[in-house]
Amino acid sequence: MKSKTIDSFFKKKSTETTQSPSKASQIETQSPSEASQIEVPHSSSVPLNSDARPSKIPRVEDEALDLSNLEREPGLRKQIYEYPVNMRDEIRRAYIKAGPYQPILLEYPASNSKKHPRYFQPSWFKKFPWLEYSPSKDAVFCLPCFLFNSNPSSRFGSTTFTHNGFRNWKKQISANRLRLKTSIDVVRWLSFQGCAFRGHDESSGSKNRGNFLELLSLLASYDEKVEDVLKSAPQNASYTSSTIQKEILQIYASRVRNVIREEIGDRKFSIIVDEARDESKKEQMAIILRFVDEQGQVKERFFDIVHVKDTASLTLKNVIFNVLLQHSFDIQNIRGQGYDGASNMRGEFNGLQALILNDYRYAYYVHCFAHRLQLALVAAAREVVEVHQFFKDLSDIVNIASASSKRHDELQKAQATEITRLVSINELATGTGMNQIGTLQRPGETRWSSHLNSVTSLLKTYNATSTVLENLKNTASNYSQRGDAHNAYNRLRSFEFIFILHIMKEVLGITDNLCQALQRRSQDILNAMSLVLTTKDLIQKLRDDGWNELLKNVISFCETWELDFPDMNAQYVVGHSRNKKEDVTVEHHYRVDIFFATIDTQLQELKSRFNENVVELLTLTTALDPKEFFKLFDIDKICILVNKFYPEDFSQQEKERLPYELKHYELDVCTHPDLRKISTLSELCRSLVESGKSVMYPLVDRLIRLILTLPVSTASSERAFSAMKIVKTRLRSKMEDDFLRSSLVVYIEKEIAEKFDVNEIIDDFNKVKNRRVQFK
């Protein structure tokens, strides 16, 4: 009796399980187009989001099955593990042959949200070929997950794509976007600060997993939602890998370049190029684009940095043009070139500027003004023997006084003692940020302003430096160090050294203002030439009227630090030979042989390297200079400038109309009470736009923009190399070239990058290629 009851139970169960496929066979046996016309009833026996599973798995008898009638509807079919073991592979093959269940319906059910209903999208079938849809549950399933699924576990979400199906479209997309947004925020912050992304050991047990993962964990600790989406992320779609980091950074860099490209548009522009070696000894070439934007503002944008195999001029030209053409720039719009004085750049026949001029005759070359100034300073320092010896002695003093950490500490201790003494006798004012302890700086021939910084640092720390050298000459460990310290001490306290120290402070102080002005991005070539003239005038004034004040300051300095100074009216004695020069006094020697000679050499170098009359283009350009109420305004010169140097930028009809427009411009703009106060061409361009007169005088406005496009210095490229030293350090010396390029573009042009909306970055990320999770 008992046996009969058990047999009848299994028979009943078998009947139920075999009936299930026949109930839904109407959908399975029809074509997709026929299936789309039918109304599919929803199953109400199991909640859509229920994780409830039967406590016991029903057993299926080992008997022959009709594989052609297997239930394909994901919400109704049995799980693979419910079939006998010896039949599972055959069943898997049948499902693989049939393919994923992807019915195309006229309309899919809406989600529970009435305010913002969401629907299943049939386009997801193409994007995710493994996806299946269950009309009975209005949920999606995963065919591979179903085929190789084992018994359900207690782990949350383990049955989502096999038993219950997934249908919370909005929540999952929001979670995916939040997860990616967190990674984007971390990449953005690290790139803006020039920090490294990865760590040496990024394993879960590492004490320091690198900046990216550590910052990601920090953000998660402040936001439970972020923590939840990071913890629940699929292992193959967490979007925190180094590859994803580089993709995000590449998207930022591409958007920055696109913005620069849109800013330039069809406007004329100049290229500023320089090259330098990075930390891994690779030759990198920086490309800066200079242009005038819609508001009349001069812009210099860092566009790219490219690794070049050699610095041959032809190689550099090809690389530059490839970069420009990749971003759809019209090479014909180049109106200027700015390089340093290297022979491969400025060579008259085979230099980069010559190669480009041969193809594009209106891409005028301007030798970097800042480099010219530095070359003038270095040349002047070498011409006068006493000045040359001064800078040699200055370098020796700096090297000896701060050669080791011990000496550096002694120097700072002596400074602190001196500052305390001066404050106690009210010789120094006190306040926040004042009287800070400094260090001696070395003069360098290739570093702008380094000569002035070295001179001023020694003047500020003179007594402390003298104290350190005096101690060294008595207490150094060997005779060589004592001898070097003794010579440096004697030179430091000599009158000639002090005299030249004060001369160079005055001369370099005047030229440093020019150096700083030349490094401004918005500097125009007319104002630069004007500043050069002003600098010459100030140096000439120092020569004519500065002797008495200089000598007074030198003697006062010697009295303050108890230094010996000679009688200026005595006869000058040459060296230690005691030979006297007839009719040559000490004052004559210092005033004529050193003071005048130093200034005359400096003036000569400035005149030869900044001769505005050499370049006819600059001479004609002065006709537009608004300085001194448009004093130099000349219609004839402006017309010559257009016809000779910019004929391609004006049509024949515009050239004929230009003189008449200039006459109206002269009566209107040159006498306008607000515009008469303007002193530079860049200010004039902005004011014409703001006042609306750029529309009234379009030809003049166009010509002014062409002149402003001419580069003044390569300071922007030098700044790019300074940034490269921050980004590509010794610990990051193995950075890939593309990663370095993207990092520098975002780091240098963060002004542009910080305006991007994170949602736009997510959308761009989603468009790059098919992603494993949905973001829209």
Image (spheres, grey):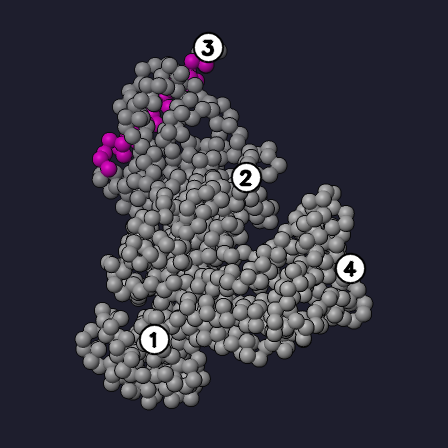
Nearest to the observer: residue 181 or residue 634: 634
Please, what is the three-letter code of the amino acid marked with disc 1? Thr
Q: Residue at x 28, y 75 (%)?
A: 641
Of tags 4 and 2, the one toward the viewer is 4
Lower sequence index among marks 2 and 3: 3
Which residue has dot 2 on it? 199
Determine if residue 766 is in view. no
Determine if residue 634 is in view. yes
- The x and y percentages for residue 724 are 48, 50
What's the distance in space between the residues labelled 1 and 3, CA to CA?
117 Å
- The x and y percentages for residue 719 are 48, 57
Please, what is the three-letter code of the amino acid marked with disc 3? Ser
Q: Residue at x 31, y 58 (%)?
A: 348
Of tags 4 and 3, the one toward the viewer is 4
What's the distance in space between the residues labelled 4 and 2, CA to CA?
44 Å
Lower sequence index among marks 1 and 3: 3
Residue 417, numbered label? 4
- The x and y percentages for residue 308 are 37, 46
What's the distance in space between the residues labelled 1 and 4, CA to CA?
56 Å
Which residue has dot 1 on it? 619
Q: Secondary structure at mark 3?
A: helix
Which residue has dot 3 on it? 3
Mark 2 Cα within 10 Å, few/some/many (few <14, many 20+)? some
Q: Are marks 4 and 2 in contact (CB under 8 Å)?
A: no
Q: Secondary structure at mark 1?
A: helix
